[in-house]
Amino acid sequence: MPQLTIIEWSGKEHHLEAETGQSVMQTALDALVPGIMADCGGSCSCATCHCYVDEAWVPRLPPPEAAERDMLECALDPLANSRLSCQLRVTAQSDGLVVRLPRSQV
Amino acid sequence: MSSNDLLIVIGAGHAGAELAVQAREGGWPGRIALVGDEPALPYHRPPLSKAYLAGALALDAMALKSRAAYDKAGIELMLGRRVVELDRSAARLRFEDGHSTQYSRLAFASGGRPRRLPAAAAGADAAENFHYLRTMADVDRIRPRFVAGARLAIVGGGYVGLEVAAVAIKHGLKVTVLEAASRVLARVTAPRVSSFYEQVHREAGVDVRTGVQVDGFDLDTTGRLVTRVHCSDGERIECDLVIAGIGLVPNTELAAAAGLAVDDGILVDAASRSSDPAIVAAGDCTRYHSALYGRSIRLESVPNALEQARCAAAAVNGNERLHEAVPWFWSDQYELKLKMVGLSQGYDRMLLRGSLEQRSFSAFYLKGAQVLAVDTVNRVPEFMLAKRLVAERIAVDPDRLVDEGVPLKNLLPLA
């Protein structure tokens, strides 16, 4: 199973076994990682699953589609490596992915 | 509270599942039982009228959290179980199967059920092709008849009805929407937004009829299938499938019978506490005083359910978290992303920014200079800004509001 690391704003790290095809958001919810609120359930409507993708991983992921870019534009504290974790799929290629959670989601 | 204490959560929807998990995260030391009358793991409800109905979402993608997550949090799932009696003086619940148990803290997250169509009470609602749409089981029953060429009559032009219509058209069904009010979405949007949605659906091929009451049904000779819908204007609509979406009734009977304060919703304060110190409540089954609107409100909304659940979880752990989030809602139909913030009741004028024709606009509901609510269509960035306009009661200049040359963010106070 692909490995996924989620780092809370506090610095606490969660090393997870992720299921291929699931979203990073759902993986976090199943592992009870605090800081992924996911209020809209992954429909790209709320930006409460905002995360920062580790710089090294940014070019290795499929780029965000328009709907996700729109949401990110208005998320709290967006950065160039911001993504919505509901739109990030776990794949064999994402093995080892590292994401960090923003200050607004604690 | 100690490890011997038991928190029972009645209702395993969005509110109940969040409440149980957050109570544990917040330090509840004892047992937690999550009771739901449906057999499935707590699941995402919004996709029922969208991707799940379309068959685009598998069963296991519907769960809010995996079974392992509840195990990890030490939450006992009591699924397919129904509570039938609450004795508050003894702090005791009785289940349908006769089993009873004592609680230390109780949480109502009992949600709601579809409002029944009076005209169907004579037998049509027992027909095999007549459905309400609230649960996964409802959709599972709908889907075998939800096939290309089938004639679908939708009773009710609210969010559920229109979302179903959009999915049905894409699947090749022949769709008629029957709305009793003079326009669709009448309870929630301004006339211009309603007519916009009517036009979108008509262009997609939906037969949208407004101002039409449904006053009866014809059944086939077996009595098991609806064949025709009777309308008050004398029309008869031939159909293979009927889906009614005419609103929600909050599940408050158990609470009311036990003497909790109930008034179209279990009454709770901003911290999700009921009139009984041992009982909290969250979600569609509750009513609370909104400081923003200065009146009591009952919302049918996932974000509201989740936030109230977080407040309720804090309350059972002896902490206070106040629900101050502004109400918001969303509805996906065709390629339109409708996102709404606030409650528009009582507005004195509606201002449009953007273009109905280009299907990209925001509708602002104003009372004086205060923005009560905003509907945005395909304007997500404006929706996020609109949340602040509503929540922070930011007074706006109407001329600048409708001027697309002025970025909306310029109407917010400087940070």
Image (cartoon, coloured by chain):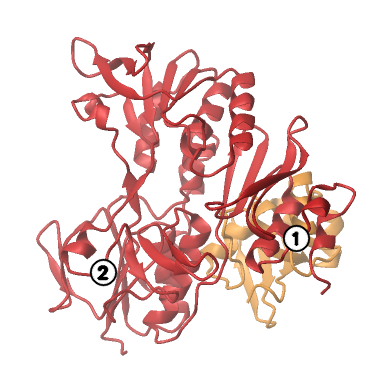
Chain colours: A orange, B red
The answer to whether the residue labelled 1 contacts the one labelled 2, judged by CB atoms less than 8 Å apart, is no
* Lateral position of residue A95 relative to residue B178, left or right: right
**Label 2 is found on which chain of the structure?**
B
Residue ID for mark 1: B396
Whether residue A47 appears in this view of the structure is: no
**Label 1 is found on which chain of the structure?**
B
From the viewer's perspective, is residue B72 above or below residue A86?
below
Callout 1 and callout 2 share a chain: yes
* Lateral position of residue B326 relative to residue B250, left or right: right
Q: In which quarter of the image is the N terminus of chain A?
A: bottom right
Q: Which kind of residue does numbered mark 1 sit on?
A: Val
Given residues B234 and B33, the one toward you in this image is: B234
Given residues A55 and B361, the one toward you in this image is: B361
From the viewer's perspective, is residue B163 above or below residue B232?
below
State the image coordinates of residue B318 (x, y, percent, origin top left). Answer: 39, 87
The residue located at (85%, 66%) in the rendering is A55
Between the residue at mark 1 and the residue at mark 2, the CA separation in whole angstroms equals: 39 Å
The residue located at (24%, 15%) in the rendering is B219
The crowd level at tag 1 (other Cα within 10 Å; few <14, some 14-19, many 20+) is some
From the viewer's perspective, is residue B94 above or below residue B237?
below
State the image coordinates of residue A89 (x, y, percent, origin top left). Answer: 68, 51
Q: In which quarter of the image is residue B1?
A: bottom left
Q: Which kind of residue does numbered mark 2 sit on?
A: Ala
From the viewer's perspective, is residue A6 above or below residue A24?
below
Q: In which quarter of the image is the C terminus of chain A?
A: bottom right
- On residue B261, which mark appears? 2
Given residues B309 and B202, the one toward you in this image is: B202
